[in-house]
Image: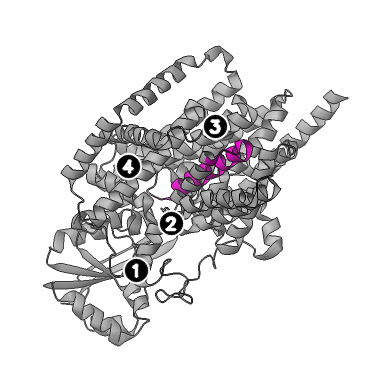
Amino acid sequence: MINVLYILLLTLISCGLGKRLLGKHVQGLSPAEGSVFSIGLGLGALAFIMLALGVAGLLHFSLVISLLLILCVCFYRDIGEFVRELISGVRRVDHKKISLFEKILLIILFSAFFFSLIGALAPPTGNDALAYHLQHPRIFLENHTIAHIPYTRESLWPYLTEMLFTLGMLLRGPVLAKLFHYLFGLLSTLAVFCLARRCAGKKTGILASVLFYLSPGIFMQASYAYVDLVLCFYVFCSVYLFFLWAADKKNGTLVFSGIFMGLALSVKVLAGMALIPMLILLLWELSRGRQRSGEKRSSFLMFLMPAVLPSSVWYARSFLVTGNPVYPFMHNIFSGGWESNLGADMGHIKGFIGFLRLPWDLVMHAKDFGGEQIGFLFLSLLPCLVFVDWKNKINRRMGVFILLYTVIWFAVDPNIRFLFPVFPIIFLLIACGLNKLISRGFVFLRAVVIAGLLFNLALAFYYNVPAVKLLSGNISEEEYLSQNERTYNTAEWVNDNLGNDSLLIVAGEPRLLYFKAQTLEYTIVNRVCEGDEGRIDAVFRQEMVPYKNVYILISGYKPDQYINNRIKKKEPVFTTSFTEDGRHIHYSIFRLK
Amino acid sequence: MRVNRDMFIETLFVTWFIFVFTAYAVFYIIPGLSENLSKIFGIIK
């Protein structure tokens, strides 16, 4: 419960900070739109503040708390204004004007929010969350500084979300970090509602937001410490403001569209997949405008500069340390990095036919696209796009953005998580068409839509059953983690038996959050040393020096010659075997020194 | 005429909806059930 209070307070501070940044630069926004953009901007600003503190080596609890209090004092008027707007907005809602259908939709939506919240309040699980989204903030906090972590693949990636995770872990712990991601899920849903309401009215707004959040990929991700909903939110805000600019042609709107794209580029390198269609749309708009060429150039730069400048901090950092701004990718162009088969094993069928089949394959072969789902409602309601008013310019622009983004996504890495940035727009357009049909009095269609949403809601509940058991006190945190996180029992043994003077070399298991001992990833050392045993040995000798005891954990990794030589004739000090998702998993720990 | 056309569209939609859900059950839910319940819903790995 304290975590929820913390996230509410941080949301208020972000809103105050964001309101001040947004000022009156973007005109004609509703209070809800203003709040969504302000909170998003404020959270982005908080992340950059954390980066600045971290780079300066000032990641201390007392300092961060003091800073948050100062922000509270500085922006108390903006925070107060937001709270007043929120209260008056809730009071303005006329229950009599909400139809039964809309009430059912809202109940489904808030139930899904609730189930995701339950999941978000449980201790963290999930591969990437434990491998680096939370593991690296933990290391940053241990060292009170944000810097490159040697022999890691990700620590120099754009880490805007991880800065918020660092803040959450510093103030309270990993659960507060998870709540940041959950918050972005809520903000994205609210943003979908706002744009849909602006384009096609309140009913479409409710439909679009429910369809978006009830997509299994979205509500499942909301309870994990991942970054994809943050990317989804910032890209959508950028697109949203771009559409507003296309209508009002006010420079401030375009600048903030660029700023949000910059925040997206600070979350993930793959935000570049959204930047390209945005630039194409911008050039198209400018080419059709009646401005002089100088004004067109300055408009272009008004979007591009705020998009590129703030986000370049992350890429410049990576370039300065490794010589590669997108380390370890593109190693052929830049000096550092290694061969990575990004997206090679993703997708069901490659090529043009595969692209045409996407709507079907995304639903029926979701495992081939990374496991998360867009949901069967997407495919069953896709024909609603026929009924969208394509004469409307905004709808046409949305369609073009979806098409361009999807083509790039399909070519680069067709992992469904990386398609999240277009989910809001897809479901918004579907909701536009669906609302047209429903308003004609299609009773059976309403019934099947509600049935489909209830099915997805049941998934949201089912998926969070272990978290419900935990929060209701039926199982302990240890039991929850033992049942839901494969590394937990091994990590417990390590934590009980290895002291501060021990180094654990890990081969084949990236999930390191629950290991308290110092760790070193063998697979990364091997990659950096290009498999050269002499170089690997030199690295190990150097890394082992400060430690009295050195162990190696082998899991899911076929020991190579180097490891075999090190563990030859040695008996493991710990072994465990179990089955996960039909795969046999075995952990062995050997003492090397 | 409008009523008939609307009824046709609605019938088409509901039929498509049921077809998709059935296909989803056949291709995704039932094979998943035989493996592991948690896999059906796409666990993040």
- Nearer to the camera, A278 or A547: A278
- Tell me the subunit letter for badge 4: A
Q: Nearer the viewer, mark 1 or mark 4?
A: 1
Q: Amino acid at mark 2?
A: Lys
> Mark 3 and mark 4: span between their CA atoms?
28 Å
**Mark 2 surroundings within 10 Å by alpha-carbon count, few (fewer than 14), some (14 through 19), many (20 or more):** few
Q: From this viewpoint, is residue A576 visible?
A: yes
Q: Nearer the viewer, mark 2 or mark 1?
A: 1
Q: Provide the secondary structure element on which disc 4 rests.
A: loop
Position above or below: A317 against A162: below
Q: Quick check: marks 3 and 4 in contact, CB under 8 Å?
A: no
Residue located beneath label 3 in the image: A193
Q: Amino acid at mark 3?
A: Phe
> Mark 2 and mark 3: span between their CA atoms?
30 Å
Task: Name the residue at 59% across, 19% down.
Answer: A100
> Mark 3 and mark 1: span between their CA atoms?
42 Å
Residue located beneath label 1 in the image: A320
